[in-house]
Image (cartoon, coloured by chain):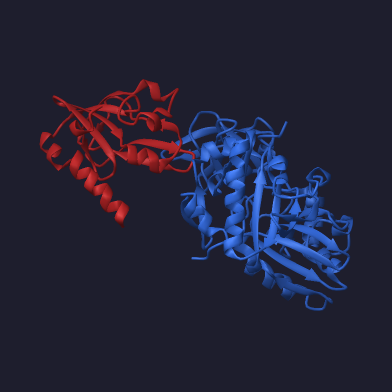
Chain colours: A red, B blue
């Protein structure tokens, strides 16, 4: 996947836009910080979420982490492969390890997301702290 | 933050460091899963220098150990080690520890990092009339654990001592890389392995750790951090002070009755425990498995027949057995193998069942 086409949150989710739909996952940085992922709890399709609401939980050996909805909308499909292979989140965070898709409700929220360059800068800022 | 003498080696090995009980410690090097599996299948090398070393010396050394701990230290002979507990008057844990019998009048007590000062003060306060000198020498010692099936071969590269002559829960004085060391066949992972105590400056201690890590490559052994230490010890059902055992649960409730010897001379906590043993306990520490893949972690609420009873004392996903397991206190009448109960995980209650422990036993 071309990272330049993705948008990002400061909570380390990524979003790929396709019309009024968005595919959502966690970034390579996030999967690395989490360590070995062993279980992913995904939201129910059809669930309405506001931007910033907890959407999924990712369990790693180390800890459990919330994934926040990067945009407001309705959950479309969830990644069926994660039930049997949660480690895909580590192996292919931007591909087969995606979490879910959602139907976007407020298109103007997209502007608040970071582009790849800005996200990289943000990560450099975290590393420099 | 306190640093072990091996601290520099962790940075050289690019470990991920965290604060643990006031110490700057490696949580992982290559990853918890990888390190856990290495210890089960080949080997792992741990810096455990944060553990405490307290020495008892003098005519009453044995008498002192007997009065302070629940197991029968009279069963020890020089070169033998015993797992035991330091108890409060109520039969609860001040700490759990290892006692090394060095000689007739000399014992080494190895205690948990977080409890060193508390244990030391407790020991001094409660044994004032005894002819014993109690000395906390934790700062002087570095400690490395080499654990896993290859540990004897790996460590043999660093010593002329015939390690095969040291049996489980025994130790020998040996030179390791030229350093005088106590080498014991003990560990906290459920595997065969050794714990090496030695006095050296930081440069020499780091050098030995790095050398073990480098030589480890030949045997596919890896440096391993606190993350794997925790998953390994839980898989082997070894209690962790502060989680599974503490000053609000007795040694009988913690299912550690085997370290309680009521027939030796009096010791702190004995009367309460003798009564508890006669009357029976009401709650007991059990091992459980989740009935689905969700992970119960330390502090999550435990519900027995719909009512909140306690919280999970330890819980994680263990990489070797590949399932979420944990420990919790349950009412004894609900603690039989296969009994089901629930654990609150976020906004749900998830089913768990009591299983036989240890979860993992070395083949």
Decide if residue B279 is in sight here: no
The picture places residue B257, in percent across and down from the top left corner, at 77, 49
Decide if residue A6 is in sight here: yes
Q: How many marks?
A: 0
Residue plotted at (15% across, 31% down):
A105
Which quarter of the rendered picture does the N terminus of chain A lie within?
Answer: top left
Q: Is residue B313 above or below residue B21?
A: above
Answer left or right for B339 relative to B79. Answer: left
Residue plotted at (88% across, 59% down):
B74
Which quarter of the rendered picture does the C terminus of chain A lie within?
Answer: bottom left
Residue plotted at (84% across, 69% down):
B61
Q: Is residue B334 above or below residue A21?
A: below
> Which residue occupies the foreground of this view, B65 or B352?
B65
Q: Is residue A45 above or below residue B129?
A: above
The picture places residue A56, in percent across and down from the top left corner, at 34, 35
Answer left or right for A58 relative to B1. Answer: left
Residue plotted at (55% across, 40% down):
B35
The picture places residue B281, in percent across and down from the top left corner, at 73, 48
Single out the residue that lies furthest toward the left: A108
> Which residue occupies the foreground of this view, B158 or B191?
B158
Answer left or right for B158 relative to B3. Answer: right
The picture places residue B110, in percent across and down from the top left corner, at 71, 60
> Which residue occupies the foreground of this view, A125 or B204?
B204
Q: Quadrant of residue B359?
A: top right
Single out the residue that lies furthest toward the bottom: B129
């Amino acid at each position: 996947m071309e990272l330049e086409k993705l948008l990002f949150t400061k909570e380390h989710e990524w979003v790929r836009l396709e019309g009024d739909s968005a595919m959502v996952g966690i970034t390579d940085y996030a999967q690395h910080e989490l360590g070995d992922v062993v279980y992913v709890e995904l939201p129910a399709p059809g669930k309405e979420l506001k931007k910033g609401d907890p959407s999924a939980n990712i369990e790693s050996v180390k800890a459990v982490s919330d994934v926040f909805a990067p945009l407001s909308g309705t959950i479309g499909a969830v990644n069926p492969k994660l039930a049997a292979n949660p480690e895909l989140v580590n192996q292919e965070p931007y591909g087969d390890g995606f979490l879910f898709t959602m139907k976007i409700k407020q298109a103007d929220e997209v502007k608040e997301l970071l582009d790849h360059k800005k996200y990289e800068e943000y990560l450099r800022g975290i590393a420099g702290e | 933050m306190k640093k072990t003498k091996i601290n520099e080696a962790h940075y050289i090995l690019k470990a991920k460091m965290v604060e643990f009980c006031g110490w700057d410690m490696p949580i992982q090097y290559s990853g918890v899963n990888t390190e856990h599996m290495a210890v089960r299948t080949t080997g792992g090398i741990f810096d455990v220098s944060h553990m405490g070393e307290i020495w008892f010396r003098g005519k009453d050394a044995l008498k002192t150990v007997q009065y302070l701990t629940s197991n029968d230290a009279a069963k020890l002979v020089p070169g033998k080690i015993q797992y035991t507990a330091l108890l409060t008057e109520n039969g609860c844990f001040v700490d759990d520890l290892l006692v090394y019998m060095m000689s007739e009048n000399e014992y080494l007590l190895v205690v948990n990092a977080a409890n060193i000062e508390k244990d030391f003060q407790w020991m001094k306060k409660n044994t004032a009339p005894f002819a014993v000198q109690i000395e906390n020498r934790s700062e002087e010692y570095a400690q490395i654990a080499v654990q896993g099936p290859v540990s004897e071969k790996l460590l043999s590269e660093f010593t002329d001592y015939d390690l095969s002559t040291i049996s489980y829960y025994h130790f020998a004085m040996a030179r390791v890389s030229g350093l005088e060391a106590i080498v014991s066949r003990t560990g906290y992972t459920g595997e065969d392995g050794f714990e090496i105590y030695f006095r050296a400056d930081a440069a020499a201690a780091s050098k030995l750790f790095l050398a073990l890590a480098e030589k480890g490559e030949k045997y596919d052994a890896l440096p391993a951090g606190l993350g794997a230490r925790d998953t390994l010890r839980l898989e082997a059902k070894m209690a962790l002070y502060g989680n599974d055992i503490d000053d609000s649960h007795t040694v009988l409730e913690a299912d550690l009755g085997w370290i309680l010897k009521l027939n030796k001379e009096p010791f702190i906590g004995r009367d309460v425990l003798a009564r508890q043993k006669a009357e029976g306990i009401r709650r007991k520490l059990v091992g459980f498995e989740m009935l689905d893949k969700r992970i119960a972690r330390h502090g999550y609420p435990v519900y027995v027949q719909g009512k909140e009873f306690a919280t999970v004392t330890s819980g994680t996903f263990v990489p070797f057995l590949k399932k979420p397991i944990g420990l919790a206190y349950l009412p004894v009448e609900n603690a039989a193998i296969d009994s089901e109960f629930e654990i609150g995980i976020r906004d749900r209650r998830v089913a768990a069942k009591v299983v036989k422990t240890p979860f993992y036993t070395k083949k």
